Image (tube, rainbow, N blue to C red):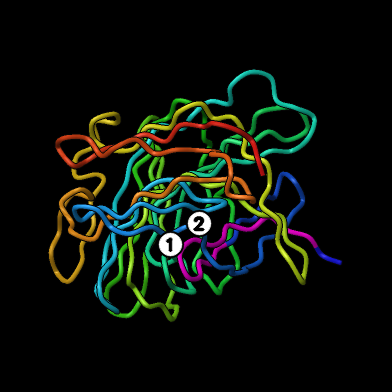
Amino acid sequence: MSRSISHARVAAVAIGALMLASAGLVGVSVGATATHLLTPTHGLRHGSSTNWAGFAVTGPSKSVTDVKGSWIVPSIHGSCPSATQYSSFWVGIDGYGSNSVEQTGTDSDCQGGSAVYYAWYEFYPHPSHQITTLTISSGDTIRAEVHFASGKFTATIKDVTTGKSFSTSARVAAQRTSAEWIAEAPSLCTITSCTVQPLADFGTVDFGTDYTSVPSTNNATVSGTNGTMGSFAHLHSIAMVNNAGTKNKATPSAVSSDKTSFTVTWVSAGP
């Protein structure tokens, strides 16, 4: 029975995957239902997920054409345990209430007792890929974008610290109803099921211009309007909880007063 690490699920159905070449695991795509979506308050919706923490902006079908983000690659805190743990940080289109994700990001993992850092991208339903041309280190500043135009998605990720970048495009069917800025605990999947894996202790990850000094992040374009994440009426805050929904695993801060930035703080490994 094949096994793989997969990014997946928040809101109705979210789909994604990650190839971990160093771990000998090939990504596949899966979906699952969300948990604990709450009533909106003053335009900000609060919800929770077993594997996502961060923010999403939503719009009508086919309305989202761009998402930009920036973050500081967080260091693994303390000594890595012998058991493998994962933490992923990314921007993307779709996945919050839809069955596709177009995304690119970085990982800060514990594998074989050591910290491992790398970049990746995916256009579901195509396979996901580790970006071997980028060497990622903790503390690096990352700028990432997913853009839709002329029927195709383009994912671009740049390590601002080293100056190296990577870009790729693909045509995939997608609803384009959301843009996301996410810290994630990936899932270990077999052919028939997926299990959220322990979340590596990344401490706190910083997203947005206030922390990275990268302009115009975190931004999205929805229905032709470009703006900072906090400027949109339909903004969703997502806390990561354990499988039972009884304990937080990672929590987002409030959006900064200039509507550009936020942090996500590790609380527990879960799952």
Q: Given the image, on which type of amino acid does mark 1 rest?
A: Thr
* Contact between labelled residues 2 and 1, with CB atoms less than 8 Å apart: yes
Q: Please indicate whether residue 52 sits to the left or right of residue 164 in the image.
A: right
Q: Which residue is mark 1?
A: 168
> Of callouts 1 and 2, which one flags the residue occurring earlier in the amino acid sequence?
2
Along the viewing direction, whichever of 151 and 218 lies nearer the viewer: 218
Q: Which residue is mark 2?
A: 121
Q: Main secondary structure of the magenta part?
A: loop
The magenta segment is: 3-16
SS label for mark 2: strand
Q: Residue 217 lies in magenta, yes or no?
A: no
The location of residue 228, given as percent across then percent down, is 18, 49
Along the viewing direction, whichever of 163 and 114 lies nearer the viewer: 114
Q: Quadrant of the C terminus?
A: top right
Please name the residue shown 29% across and 65% down the image: 58
- Few, some or many C-alpha atoms within 10 Å of disc 1 (few <14, some 14-19, many ≥20)? few
Q: CA distance from mark 1 to mark 2?
A: 9 Å
Q: Please indicate whether residue 254 sits to the left or right of residue 16 in the image.
A: left
Q: Quadrant of residue 200?
A: top right
Q: Quadrant of residue 214?
A: top left
- Few, some or many C-alpha atoms within 10 Å of disc 2 (few <14, some 14-19, many ≥20)? many
Q: Please indicate whether residue 41 sits to the left or right of residue 238 in the image.
A: left
Q: Given the image, on which type of amino acid does mark 2 rest?
A: Tyr
The location of residue 250, given as percent across then percent down, is 50, 38
Work out whether 28 lies above or below 105: below
Please name the residue shown 62% across and 68% down the image: 29
